[in-house]
């Protein structure tokens, strides 16, 4: 779930003085770093700050990793996305809006493609849950898919679903644990496993079939931005426009000199880096587990999850290990875990779109009804509710819909990566901005996705 983004509260949060490290030149249009960052947690206290990593990892279950095999590491991208919010206390979208050039150009680069990604992504995920509901309870697939979309968008627009979302995350964690345990139970001999880890191109390799997988790596393209939201909400570095208030167990206080401020923020960036690494490693374990299960249980039977029976095919992963219990466990967990992910994605996209809209409108006079809450409701009901329903009724196949979601995500990722690189290099002071190696790695990741997108167009 993406939390509240900047508004008047953001202006107040950033109104306190600007801090600039002595002897280091300012970059073009520099943003103020935090005047009073929190002390960096030490020892076991750090574990309490790994929440955003867990949230991001669990979101992978509902964003394509159940269906596709991610192939690249997201660590550098999500780490760099969280850098700006950690250092400044501002949202990443706010930072994009401050980039030099025509007003709001970077926000438009995010906004338009993500409208498409939101519609297709929510449609595909809802169709997958509808497939599981049809298997569990019987009846037509469309009834469960449209029922979920209607109920979820209504709850996101008008209700409070925090408790339900927490429950869905627990279900997702149970699904992850069961999948890993099942994979361990059918793990092939070490020699076979090692041979499978050697990169090679199969004889029946189809580029058009593989390329959409890359776009659904873990949390997808917008998940890069959302990781920055989650770290800011958790209070990395100190209170922000998103966290709202200080954590009493590690209160924000005066760090003293500019050098002390710099050192604290550098410590927070190290913690962000470790949390991002933990998230990616955890997500990779989930992906490997599904890989092993697919290779050992589905491949020998020639099964490839497809069509409206995709949930039944996936449930056979655990049925092959634990019989009927495994089959129904996966079905039930899919309904609850991924149903919660549908709402989380609807909430995240609708909040992000509302934030972008307000940032694009700026401080100009607006009608009284044009509030963030009303904008969020409109986007939840329209972009993540009615529009995905129309896509589903047109296509019906969850795998086909999710494939196109992967294509959109892969094509948009290079632009998000480029904006992150620009905002960090342009706005952060030396020592807190990414170094040459980090910038080069981030640029390489963006070029990789650009190449994937061009290859997809070619086929």
Image (cartoon, grey):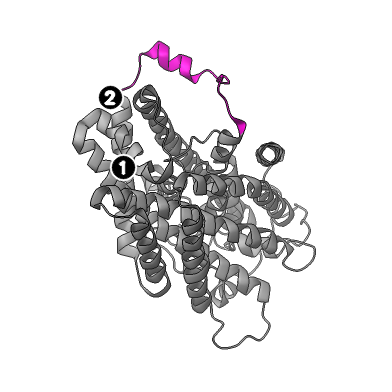
> Residue 387's x, y, as percent?
52, 64
Find residue 332 and name its label.
none
Decide: is 434 above or below 167. Answer: above
Where, quadrant-wise, is the N terminus in this rendering? bottom left
Q: Residues within 10 Å of mark 1 (few under 14, many from 20)?
A: many
Q: Is residue 123 left or right of residue 72?
A: left
> Residue 158's x, y, as percent?
39, 75
Q: Is residue 203 magenta?
A: yes
Q: Is residue 38 visible?
A: no
Where, quadrant-wise, is the C terminus in this rendering? top right
Name the residue located 48 percent from the left edge and 67 percent from the top edge: 386
Callout 2: helix, strand or loop? helix
> Residue 400's x, y, as percent?
51, 45
Q: Is residue 297 left or right of residue 81?
A: left
- Write down the quadrant of residue 258 in the picture: bottom right
Magenta part of the chain:
185-207
Name the residue located 35 percent from the left edge and 55 percent from the top edge: 339
Q: Residues within 10 Å of mark 2 (few under 14, many from 20)?
A: few
Please tell me which residue lies in front, 327 or 377.
Answer: 327
Q: Is residue 235 left or right of residue 115?
A: left
Q: Is residue 16 magenta?
A: no
Decide: is 313 above or below 393. Answer: above
| Mark 2 lies on residue | 185
| Mark 1 lies on residue | 175
Name the residue located 25 percent from the left edge and 28 percent from the top edge: 321
Residue situated furthest bottom in the rendering:
368
> Residue 227's x, y, as percent?
51, 52
Name the residue located 57 percent from the left edge and 38 percent from the top edge: 214
Asked if the residue at tag 1 contacts the one at tag 2, i.e. Cβ–Cβ closer than 8 Å, the answer is no
């Amino acid at each position: 779930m993406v939390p509240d983004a900047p508004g008047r509260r953001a202006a107040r949060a950033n109104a306190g003085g600007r801090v600039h490290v002595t002897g280091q030149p300012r970059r073009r249009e520099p943003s103020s770093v935090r005047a009073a960052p929190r002390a960096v947690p030490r020892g076991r206290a750090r574990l309490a700050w790994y929440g955003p990593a867990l949230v991001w990892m669990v979101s992978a279950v509902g964003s394509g990793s159940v269906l596709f095999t991610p192939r690249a590491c997201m660590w550098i991208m999500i780490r760099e996305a969280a850098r700006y919010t950690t250092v400044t206390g501002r949202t990443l979208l706010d930072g994009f809006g401050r980039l030099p050039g025509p007003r709001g150009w970077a926000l438009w680069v995010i906004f338009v493609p993500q409208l498409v990604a939101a519609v297709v992504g929510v449609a595909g995920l809802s169709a997958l849950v509808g497939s599981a509901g049809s298997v569990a309870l019987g009846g037509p697939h469309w009834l469960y898919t449209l029922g979920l979309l209607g109920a979820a968008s209504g709850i996101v627009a008008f209700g409070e679903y925090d408790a339900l979302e927490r429950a869905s995350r627990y279900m997702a964690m149970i699904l992850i644990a069961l999948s890993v345990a099942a994979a361990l139970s059918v793990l092939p001999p070490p020699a076979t496993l090692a041979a499978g880890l050697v990169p090679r191109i199969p004889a029946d390799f189809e580029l058009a079939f593989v390329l959409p997988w890359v776009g659904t790596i873990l949390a997808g393209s917008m998940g890069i931005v959302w990781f920055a939201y989650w770290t800011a909400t958790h209070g990395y570095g100190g209170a922000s426009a998103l966290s709202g208030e200080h954590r009493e167990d590690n209160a924000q206080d005066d760090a003293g000199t500019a050098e002390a401020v710099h050192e604290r923020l550098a410590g927070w960036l190290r913690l962000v880096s470790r949390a991002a690494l933990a998230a990616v490693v955890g997500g990779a374990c989930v992906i490997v587990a599904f890989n092993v299960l697919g290779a050992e249980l589905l491949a020998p039977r020639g099964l490839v999850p497809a069509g409206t029976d995709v949930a039944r095919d996936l449930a056979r992963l655990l049925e092959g290990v634990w019989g009927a219990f495994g089959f129904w466990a996966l079905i039930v967990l899919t309904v609850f875990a991924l149903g919660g992910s549908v709402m989380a994605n609807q909430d995240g996209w609708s909040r992000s779109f509302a934030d972008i809209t307000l940032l694009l409108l700026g401080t100009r006079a607006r009608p009284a009804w044009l509030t963030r809450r009303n904008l969020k409701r409109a986007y939840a009901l329209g972009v993540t509710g009615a529009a995905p329903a129309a896509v589903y009724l047109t296509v019906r196949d969850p795998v086909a819909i999710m494939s196109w979601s992967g294509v959109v995500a892969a094509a948009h990722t290079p632009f998000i990566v480029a904006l992150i690189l620009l905002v960090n290099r342009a706005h952060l002071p030396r020592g807190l901005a990414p170094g040459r190696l980090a910038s080069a790695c981030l640029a390489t990741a963006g070029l990789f996705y650009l190449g994937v997108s061009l290859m997809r167009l070619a086929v």
